[in-house]
C-alpha cells in the first residue's frame, strides 16, 4: 500500500525547525524548509507538531497478553521470582483466556495507535503448545501487514532441553515463517549453557536467521552466559544479528566488571534489550551505550501472567528507562528516545528507517516542541503514518 505524492507540511523535525516532507511511493522523497516545497498532490498539514520515525517495539509477547479481555489478577510466585513457576501460572491462565488471535489483535492495535510501526514479538514454541501459537500470530501478522512490520521469534518458553521435541519445533517454526530463533536462560532453566546454545545457534546457522535470547539470570551466571553468546556470535560471523533480552545480570556487576563485559558485547555486535522493569536490577544503559553497545527496548509483557502493567507506548517506555536510569539532561533524554527509535531499528536491522530522504515514510506526529519534551511528557494526540498513509489517530487504528 502506498500513497503517491503527498506533502506533509509544517512538520517539526528533531532539529526544532519546520519542514515540508514530500512522500512518494511510501518513501520520503524530499525534506525542504516549510513553505518551500511544491505541493502538487495531497497536502497533510502537520501544524507544527514534532514528526519522528515510527517507534520500534523490540520485545513483546503477542500470544500471552490478556489486553482487551477480562482482567486477570496477578499471582505472585510462592518463594520469590521463579521462571518455572511463572510459566506454569501462564499455562493455567492461557487455558481460560479469550481466543489468542483476538487478544493478539487487541494488543497490536494498542501498540500501533501509540505509534509503533516496527515490532519484534516472541511467540511460544514448545512441547506444550507446539506451533499453534505461532500459526495464530502469523495469521494476525498477515492481517496487519500494510500497517506494521512484525518480526517473530520462535521462543522456547519451556526451555529447549527440558521440553521434549523443542529443538525440532524451533527448526519447524523457522520453516513456518518465524524470522528469528529464541532462547531462555540456558544455565538456570536448561542447566546446560552449551547444550542450549548449540541448538539456538545451530538453528540460526542452518536457516540464516537472527537470534534473540531471553536471559533473566543474575550476576556472574548471567555474565558468563552473555560471554558465551558473544563468543559464538563472533565465531559464526553473526555480529549485529544477535540480541540478549533483559540481561538483568549486567545490573549486578561493579562498574569495572560492567565496562569490561560491555566492551566484549560491543565488539561482538550483540545488542541488549531492556524494558527497565520495576522489580529488577537492569542493565546500566548509559555505560553500555558509552562502550558502543546497541541498547533497544520493548514493552515485553502487557497485562499478562508476568505482570499487570503495560500500555504499548514506546515513548512512555523511553520515559521509564530514562527515569530509572537517572537521565536528566537533554542529551540523556535524547538517548532514551534513541533507544525506542534509531537504536531499536539498528538492533532489528530495519532497512530505510528514519526521517531522511530515501527512508520509509513511517512516522508519528506528537504535540511536543522537541525530543526531550516528548520523552518526559509522552503526549497523546498522535497521528501515525505507515508508508505515508494515516493508520492511526486519537489512539485508534484506522482500518
Ligand atoms: Zn519476553
Image: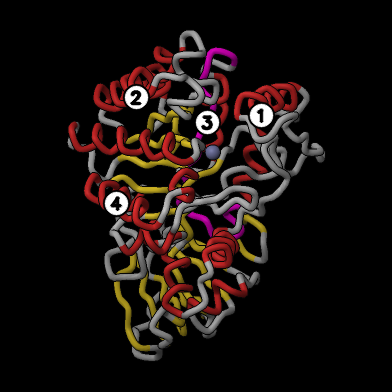
Calculate the distance from the C-alpha at mark 2 to the C-alpha at mark 1. Answer: 23 Å
Q: Which of marks 4 and 2 is in front?
A: 4
Where residue 131 sits: x, y (%)? 51, 18
Disc nearer the start of the sequence (4/2): 2
Ligand 1 contact, mark 3 (Cβ < 8 Å): no
Q: Nearer the viewer, mark 3 or mark 1?
A: 1
Between disc 2 and disc 1, whose residue precedes? 1
Mark 2 vs mark 3: give the one in front: 2
Do the residues bearing badges 1 and 4 touch, measured as CB atoms within 8 Å?
no
Which structural element holds mark 2? helix
Q: Mark 2 points at which residue?
A: 197
Q: Nearer the viewer, mark 1 or mark 4?
A: 4
Distance Cα–Cα, label 1 vs label 4: 33 Å
Tell me which numbered mark, 3 or 1, is placed earlier along the sequence.
1
Which residue is at the front of the view, 303 or 279? 279
Against 166, is 321 above or below? below
Q: Distance between the residues labelled 4 and 2?
A: 22 Å
Q: Mark 4 points at which residue?
A: 260
Q: Which residue lies furthest to the top in this view?
A: 164
Q: Which of marks 4 and 3 is in front?
A: 4
Residue 241, by quadrant, is: top left
Q: Start and end of the magenta stretch? A: 111-128
| Ligand 1 positioned in quadrant | top right
Mark 3–mark 1 Cα distance, whole angstroms, equals: 16 Å
Per the image, label 1 sits on a secondary structure element best described as helix
Q: Nearer the viewer, residue 367 or 222?
A: 222
Amino acid at each position: 500500500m502506498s500513497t503517491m505524492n503527498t506533502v506533509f507540511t509544517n512538520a517539526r523535525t528533531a532539529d526544532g525547525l519546520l519542514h515540508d516532507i514530500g512522500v512518494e511511493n511510501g518513501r520520503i522523497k524530499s525534506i525542504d524548509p516549510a513553505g518551500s516545497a511544491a505541493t502538487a498532490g495531497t497536502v497533510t498539514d502537520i501544524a507544527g507538531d514534532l514528526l519522528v520515525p515510527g517507534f520500534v517495539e523490540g520485545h513483546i509477547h503477542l500470544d500471552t497478553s490478556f489486553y482487551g479481555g477480562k482482567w486477570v489478577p496477578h499471582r505472585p510466585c510462592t518463594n520469590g521470582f521463579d521462571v518455572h513457576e511463572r510459566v506454569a501460572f501462564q499455562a493455567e491462565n492461557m487455558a481460560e483466556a479469550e481466543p489468542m488471535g483476538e487478544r493478539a489483535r487487541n494488543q497490536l492495535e494498542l501498540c500501533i495507535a501509540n505509534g509503533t510501526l516496527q515490532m519484534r514479538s516472541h511467540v511460544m514454541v514448545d512441547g506444550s503448545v507446539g506451533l499453534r501459537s505461532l500459526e495464530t500470530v502469523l495469521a494476525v501478522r498477515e492481517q496487519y501487514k500494510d500497517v506494521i512490520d512484525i518480526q517473530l521469534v520462535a521462543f522456547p518458553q519451556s526451555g529447549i532441553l527440558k521440553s521434549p521435541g523443542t529443538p525440532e519445533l524451533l527448526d519447524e517454526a523457522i520453516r513456518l515463517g518465524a524470522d528469528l530463533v529464541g532462547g531462555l536462560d540456558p544455565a538456570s532453566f536448561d542447566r546446560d549453557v552449551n547444550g542450549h546454545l548449540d541448538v539456538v545457534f545451530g538453528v540460526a546457522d542452518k536457516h540464516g536467521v537472527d537470534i534473540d535470547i531471553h536471559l533473566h539470570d543474575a550476576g556472574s551466571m548471567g555474565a558468563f552466559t552473555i560471554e558465551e553468546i558473544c563468543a559464538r556470535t563472533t565465531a559464526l560471523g553473526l555480529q549485529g544479528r544477535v540480541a540478549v533480552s533483559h540481561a538483568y545480570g549486567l545490573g549486578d556487576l561493579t562498574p569495572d566488571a560492567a565496562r569490561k563485559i560491555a566492551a566484549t558485547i560491543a565488539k561482538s555486535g550483540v545488542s541488549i534489550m531492556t524494558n527497565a522493569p520495576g522489580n529488577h536490577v537492569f542493565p546500566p544503559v548509559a555505560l553500555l551505550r558509552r562502550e558502543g553497545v546497541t541498547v533497544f527496548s520493548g514493552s515485553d509483557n502487557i497485562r499478562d501472567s508476568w505482570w499487570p502493567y503495560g500500555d504499548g507506548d514506546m515513548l512512555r517506555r523511553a520515559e521509564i528507562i530514562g527515569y530509572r536510569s537517572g537521565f536528566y539532561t537533554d542529551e540523556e533524554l535524547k538517548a532514551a528516545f534513541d533507544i525506542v527509535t534509531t537504536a531499536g531499528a539498528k538492533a532489528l536491522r530495519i532497512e530505510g528507517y528514519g526521517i531522511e530522504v530515501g527512508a520509509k515514510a513511517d512516522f508519528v506526529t506528537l504535540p511536543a516542541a522537541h525530543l526531550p519534551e516528548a520523552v518526559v511528557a509522552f503526549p497523546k494526540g498522535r497521528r501515525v503514518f505507515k508508508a505515508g498513509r494515516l493508520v492511526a489517530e486519537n489512539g485508534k487504528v484506522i482500518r
